[in-house]
Amino acid sequence: MSHLFEHNGAKGQGYSQPAPVLPATEITLPSGLSRKALPRWPRLSEPEMVRHYTWLSKRNFGIDTGFYPLGSCTMKHNPRVNEVIAQIPGIADIHPHQPEHHLQGLLSIFHEMQYMLEVCAGMDQVTLQPVAGAQGEFTAVRCIQEYFRLRGEVQRTKVIVPDSAHGTNPASAAMCGFEIVEIPSRTDGRIDLDALRAVADDTIAVMMITNPNTLGLFEEDILEASSIIHDVGGQMYYDGANFNAILGITSPGLMGFDAVHFNLHKTFSQPHGGGGPGSGPIGVKEHLAQFLPGPLVGKRAADDDELDAAVDENWYHWYQPTHSIGKVQQWHGNAGAIIRCWAYYRRYGRGLRTMSEHAVLNANYLRHAIHKATKEAGVDSLVVDGAEAKVAKHEFTLSLAPAKEAHGISAMDVAKGLLDMGYMAPTVYFPLVVPECMMVEPTETESKDTLDTFATHFAEVLQVDAETLHAAPITTPVRRVDEVYAARNLCLRHPYDDE
Amino acid sequence: MVDQLPNLGREAEMLAAMGMTSIEELFADIPSEVRMKDDLPLPPPQSEEEILSDARRLLGSNVALGERVSFLGAGLYRNYVPASVFQLVTRGEFLTAYTPYQPEVSQGMLQAMWEFQTLISELVGLPIANLSLYDGSTAAAEALTCSVRVHTRKATQKDTVYVSELTPPDRLSVMQNYCQGAEIKIKLLRHNDDGTLDMDSVSDAVGSCGVYVEQPNPLGLLDGGVTQLKEILGEHTALIVAVQPVSLGLVEAPGHYGADIVVGEGQPLGSPITGGGPIYGIFACSKPYLRLMPGRIVGRSIDVDGKTAYCLTLSTREQHIRRHRATSNICTNETLIALMGAMHMALLGPEGLYDLAVRNMTACIMGKQKLATIDGIRMPHSNGDHFNEFAIELPGDTKDCLEYLDSVGIVGGFNLSSWYPERTNWMLVTFTDQTQANHIDLLVRHLREWISTLEVAA
């Protein structure tokens, strides 16, 4: 079967259900509300359903399938015990409106996660509510917006974003109602302090920036950038997409930031599930804490009559920040993701620094290995570093501009060639400041052998002639997909026979 | 950490290959002023076994609803998710993939999401669905901003939307956060004493950009009046209807009575409650909203050989292309949970959905019948039809009642005074496909006992 809607078996279903507690004849509905025709869903037995989705899974590439060096996405191994933990009824089968004494275990884990993220980021208060990185950005910028409103600084209508920033930064700030001021980066992707000074004035509310930047380079001038913004009364926002490079080594707090979001699905191994769920907690300095979305988790010594329900000597409780912006998700965020990431962080504990060291070691080693392999294969003239730098952090960029010029081989061609070699391709064409860009992030969970082999295969792809590469991939479930056709001939659902 | 880091012990070898002698050299570009001076103040690393043991102890101390008899819903509903859904969704090819940026090696998830779009489209009666938003509240909020983008130019009430006054405050708060940036005014639609929407209030919304109501409403009431809204509002105001998706096995699809956008908490199809997340938000719409809608969409296409292939499409609405002019900042969504939804829907089939809806609704009817026999309990909307839940008015304080029920092992309903402060002594009691007749008998018995303690005290 090639898709679900070709299954239209006998009336019935893939799992049998118990009888209702009353016959259906007891049901009455307001006039006009009785459904006239059931949805035209397929009819599958369980074996057919299992085979369909197993077949689909085999047409999908995950970290478990092979090396996934997708820059900016931190595709590290997802430990399996975390999935076992997430199925424990004490997380899977709990309701956010249950009373505190039903949820002391959950609240204690939330409290521990708030604390862990606070000390890693050098922030004073964390909320776990935002459910994705972009929502974390939005939430933090909203908090800063309310902070300025309360101070009467309503003239601060602008947010500064470097041109190399993730697209979510300007999109999130714009959703809050801010005007976006984009500033150019230097050719190495680093922040241009002169350009920053030129736009910094008392109309600036926030500067949003990631460090290491989107080229994988550390912004050595970050303290200077922070003081330029703080001198005009603005706030510094840290995009935590690249947090995997710096845990235990430096922190946004030390760099002068006022607010930060975390991508738990990147740094803390929440499986990304082909597009989500994620989790995007934010941390802020003290002066912004009262604006966070609530409730937050606090703790106090447990009273005697609470000890039966308590998990330790403390009582964990919800509380509302005094000037809270309200909610960004109706419940308590992606609690199931928080639990997985708690289980993940516990593996490292105070050793999280070793994780980041290995992420950076692997990235630099792979950069070195690729240059070595391409040199040995005589194709080193086709690929150059995206930016000059002695060391990169957790990821690095390459430019295929020379290959494009010499042979008409684009970064996309190389990406598709790598798919034929059994790899997920690195991120391509981002950041835009690097022509024919390929952004590579191996993460700390890949072995030296994998990195060596990938480097060799990368050099092999560069030896392939342009015509063959234009036709790649040929070994994948489908060959190059026509995205223009998809947009011009919109087919967003199964066309039933009568349509 | 040993089991997560394949290159532990190989650092020197790897550094030597780069002409380095210490890890420190890799961090030479980080100025000393911003370096962390001390170790992270965190516990020592643990093994998998120790973590699992701690998780079992801590999470085991939570009261899982399945251990008790529960009547708590209010937007999230206990359900049964078939075993095969969990087995399949944890396949690594689905679980550990990123967003399908390389469609040639992501056909499995892309096709599964295109199928999900079709399942939702059929369910709600609208031609277009995206592949999920974060939850019901963010889907509702995005629907409001979308309605303004589409309609404000021709609207006589510019940048204005109307929302049912019964909308739970936490959901409303999400809407306010999403709407304030575009300076969208949110006005409230009134309800009558019997719980139905006040049609005079609806006439006030004519000329606005969008109207948001829920079916069933937040008090579980099915409101036939909602089918009349589109006619009153006309084509220049978006009718946004939020649904409990399982109810659509019995209740007419909003797309068939004029809804322009349908949103909702997808959770009852495919996902356990999970403390409120990760779950998934449904977003479906009609054609005029397509190019201004939020979220990812999969389209069917062809590959270079003309073979059917799927890819993300209409990306020019999205943040990675359009940046600050994007229709939403959403990037990561809830794909994997939507996949669980698709699997559950595939197993149910049309008749299975009907059966599931019948189980939910008849449990609620039985609850109403049995609770009606209790002296002292009033049902403010007893004349209406309810799905999953209904409000009761108690002869005493709801908090007190819930504590009493808790002491006898029952997770009672939801204290409605936390949504509607003026409705003291109101409680929302919820019945799902997991509710059994003896559960309801137990609730009735203990409610009677609680009421008798009030009478003694009086």
Image (spheres, coloured by chain):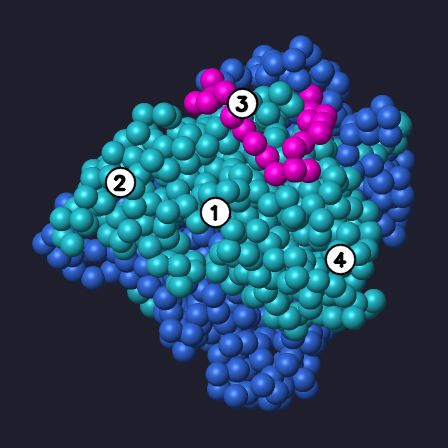
Chain colours: A blue, B cyan
Q: Which residue is mark 3?
A: A24
User: Dot 2: few (<14), some (14–19), or many (≥20) neighbours within 10 Å?
Assistant: many
Chain designation of label 3 = A
As measured in the structure, the alpha-carbon distance from the residue carrying label 3 to the one carrying label 4 is 34 Å
**Considering only order in the chain, which callout, 4 or 1, is on the residue closer to the N terminus?**
4
Q: Residue furthest left?
A: A304
Task: Say if mark 1 contacts mark 4, CB within 8 Å.
Answer: no
Q: Chain of mark 2?
A: B
Give the label on residue B233, or none.
Answer: 4
Q: Amino acid at mark 2?
A: Leu
Q: Please check whether the numbered discs 2 and 1 fall on a single chain.
A: yes
Badge 2 or badge 1: first in the primary sequence = 1
Q: Main secondary structure of the magenta part?
A: loop
Badge number at residue B424: none
Q: Amino acid at mark 3?
A: Ala
Crowding at label 1, few (<14), some or many (≥20) Cα neighbours within 10 Å?
some
- Is A171 inside the magenta-drawn segment? no
Residue A21 inside the magenta-drawn segment: yes
Disc 1 residue type? His
Q: Are marks 1 and 3 in one subunit?
A: no
Question: Which of the chains bears the disc numbered 4?
Answer: B
Tell me whether circle 3 and circle 4 mark residues in contact (CB < 8 Å).
no
Circle 2 SS class: helix
Q: Which residues are magenta?
A: A19-42
Mark 4 closeness class: few <14, some 14–19, many ≥20 residues within 10 Å: many
Q: Nearer the viewer, mark 1 or mark 3?
A: 1
Per the image, the residue denoted by label 1 is: B381
Q: Which residue is mark 2?
A: B447
